[in-house]
Amino acid sequence: MIQDMDDIKIVTMGGGTGLSTMLRGLKKYTENLTAVVTVSDNGGSSGILRRELDMLPPGDIRNCILALAETEPIMEKVFQYRFTEGSLSGQNFGNLFLAALNGIFGSFEQAIEKTSEVLAVKGKVLPVTIENVELCALFDDLVLVEGESEIVQRCKNDRKNIKDVWLHPKNPKPYDKVIEDINEADILVLGPGSLYTSIIPNLLVKDIAEVIKESKPTVIYVSNIMTQPGETDDYNLIDHINVIEKYLGKGIIDYIIVNNQEIPSEILELYIEDGAIPVTYNKNLLKDKGIKVLEAPLLKILSGTTLIRHNSDKLAEVIISILKQL
């Protein structure tokens, strides 16, 4: 049984808003925390900087840095500020800050480290690879699409199922510090986040899946609360697990954390209208796979919106409860 949280090494893996949401809760328990972030984003402000400055997309990295930051609230507002006028319209200040440091040091890794110092980050944020990669997908109608934002757009517009995904170029080299941290990890947390565009891209980087299998950390998957229109239409939890196991391997996941809190009917109706439904699960089927299911009230509605998210603090509590059993 673990006596001291400082002795525990937690590695989280994902992208998008799901990963940063979880990190906000976990940082209250330990600084021995690493966020491994996918770098296949090619849309919005990140996509523009990626194309024009030949750098890795900074958006998801920025969000994770801010999630782990111990700085004044005004600094977070500054780093999340998005310009609305002129030639900078749509650009995010935090992304531009990372781009500036990337230019100064000639290294995106150093840009991340320096930004983390400025914002007094607890833990580490690492890109899964420092190579320039594109996410590619083959849909069930045999149409091939290259580019994360293009894949997401086709999912939403045409509602076709994804059959397979890969990175181009294939087998990009992992960032060496990621391999080091996975090897040292006591716990590896996958998700929450988009299945095909936030979680799986990390597993497509060369050696990542193999190192997870060999180092054998306790692997936790945080289930999404809702399906994603087009990307995971009608997927239940077993469907999500089957996809992850296709790229990670079977028998690797030890725990799954699921939300058991009821969604307010007025919020649920809006999601259903958009083509999303709650991710359902069968505990007996998961037990047959050798996976332990932990249920908890994890629902949070973002203030002033109808957006469903995980409750950072409650999710962290469940993850820490698993740690205390090890």
Image (cartoon, grey):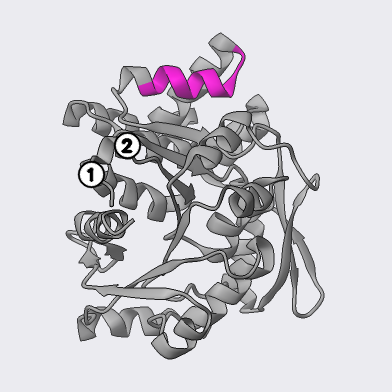
Residue marked by disc 2: 7
Residue 277 higher or lower than 34, as above or below: below
Q: Amino acid at mark 2?
A: Asp
Q: Tell me what residue is drawn at x 60 percent, y 18 percent.
A: 107
Q: Which region is colored magenta?
A: 106-116
In the figure, residue 241 lies in which quadrant?
A: bottom right
Name the quadrant of the C terminus. bottom left
- Contact (CB < 8 A) between labels 2 and 1? yes
CA distance separating discs 2 and 1: 8 Å
Asked whether residue 105 appears in the rendered view, the answer is yes
Asked whether residue 30 appears in the rendered view, the answer is no
Q: Which mark is on residue 113?
A: none
Q: Secondary structure at mark 2?
A: helix
Rendering coords of residue 252 (x, y %): 56, 64
User: Magenta stretch: dominant SS?
Assistant: helix
Residue marked by disc 1: 3
Residue at the far front in the pictured view: 1
Q: Amino acid at mark 1?
A: Gln
Q: Tell me what residue is drawn at x 36 percent, y 47 percent.
A: 20
For this rendering, which residue is in front, 308 or 123?
A: 123
Residue 125 higher or lower than 113, as above or below: below
Q: Secondary structure at mark 1?
A: loop
Rendering coords of residue 176 (x, y %): 63, 30
Q: Tell me what residue is drawn at x 30 percent, y 23 percent.
A: 119
Marker count (numbered): 2
For this rendering, which residue is in front, 108 or 54?
A: 108
In the figure, residue 231 lies in which quadrant?
A: bottom right
Q: Is residue 285 magenta?
A: no
